[in-house]
Image (spheres, rainbow, N blue to C red):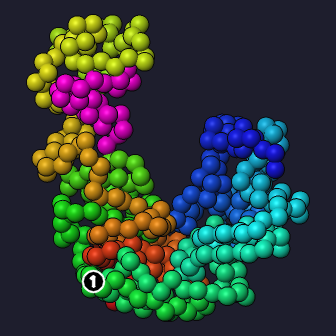
Amino acid sequence: MGCTPTDIIQEHDFKEFKKQYGVDIGQSIHSKGSGDEDSGLHLIDLYRVRNTTLYEEFKKFGHIKGGFERLQRIDKNYRMFKKTNNIKDYTDLINEFVLQKTTPRLDIVIIDEVQDLKPSEWGIVSMLQAQAKAVYIAGDDDQAIFSWSGADVTKLIDLDCRTQVLNKSYRIPKSVFIRSNRLVDRITKRIPKIWTPRDSVGMIRTVPFESIDMSQGQWLVLTRTNYFLERVAEEVKRRGHLFEKNNGSSISPQILQAYRSWRKLQRQENVSYDEAKNLYQYMSLGDNGVTRGKKTLPGANQEESFNYQELCRNWGLNLSIQSPWDTVLTKITGFERLYIQQILDRGHDLDEKAKIKLSTIHGAKGGESQNVVLFSDLSYRISKTLWSMRDEERRVFYVGLTRAKENLYIVPSSTKYEFEEILS
């Protein structure tokens, strides 16, 4: 296609678009999420990957703030913005590749995760297939959970080709195997598969979240939507657990680095220029912190590293190396200090990675854990369309169930909006 990275739309371009037009479309165009978006802005990308029209997708989606006229205006502004700045997005590249109707001749083509391919991407598969000597396609229609962003699993289901099922799971125990297969067997149109689980029986319990003790072992906590994930994160934080949410730490990276930098100095290790400068940002000025005028390390060599003695001698550090972290990092807010202390009181070392991960089901696809907590809650918008989208939700929750390597905890909803099929 002759494109370089500067030809592709970046985060700063989306920020500029928002500045010019007052609309943030970055997440929608990137297709990041869990299919629970209410704004409808993802339709700007959806009609292009499905090779339909914006109005067709609007009619299927339902009510959108500002109606079709607003959506159409945003779409027009986005196309003009890209043209003016001479940039393209991923969908542009795919569609242009298909239109040029030329592909390299390859001996072998291997395509993975085909259940997630969109109609425009299937166009590329067809082109490559016509020119290749052999094509190997891998996918699982039961894990097709991105239909909301344009993926078309029927293309995989209807393929006319020789097939081979990977008939042994090295992750899933027997109890999870039975529950998850009971769920996907209800899907109206799917590829039947015969496979076996691990020898381990595993365990499934349906329990309220408050009764689950996550103090030991590795944990993966899954929710259907980002909104509910935020609520779960608040509860886990209130309990004093260190965790990762969507691959980000529950403690700000800067605070975590400041804590770890002080611990390194106490162990007589050196810290880098960036680590020292970040550490100083969380310390007070004066005799119980850093000498005024030294906090930004003016004149320091940014390629150097520093030990405790050098920081005291040359860079204004006025604290004893024996000082506890909470008397050093006084600029951390009271709530964060209390949270960190709770984590430490639980015996967790902040130099280690979190043992608890929080994610939407969509964000955890491909992941696994010894212990999985799966919430059955649905959003109001998803529950409204459940009658027509039940097979899609069966696939989503099948992915959630099958992340468990040993123990699966299913948390029933406290509201009427839940996917009840996973409860038994």
The percent position of residue 122, horizontal first and vertical second, equals 74, 71
For the magenta stretch, what is the residue range?
251-275
In magenta stretch: residue 255: yes
53 is higher (above) or lower (below) than 390 = above
Q: Amino acid at mark 1?
A: Ser
Residue sitting nearer the eye, 394 or 57:
394
The percent position of residue 125, horizontal first and vertical second, equals 75, 70
397 is higher (above) or lower (below) than 248 = below
Residue 187 in the figure: left or right of residue 175: right
The percent position of residue 375, horizontal first and vertical second, equals 35, 72
Q: Residue at x 32, y 34 (%)?
A: 257
Q: SS for tag 1?
A: loop
Q: Residue at x 71, y 87 (%)?
A: 161
Residue 148 seen in the figure = no
Residue 64 seen in the figure = yes
Q: Which residue is mark 1?
A: 200
The percent position of residue 158, horizontal first and vertical second, equals 70, 87
Q: Quadrant of residue 356?
A: bottom left
Residue sitting nearer the eye, 61 or 94:
94
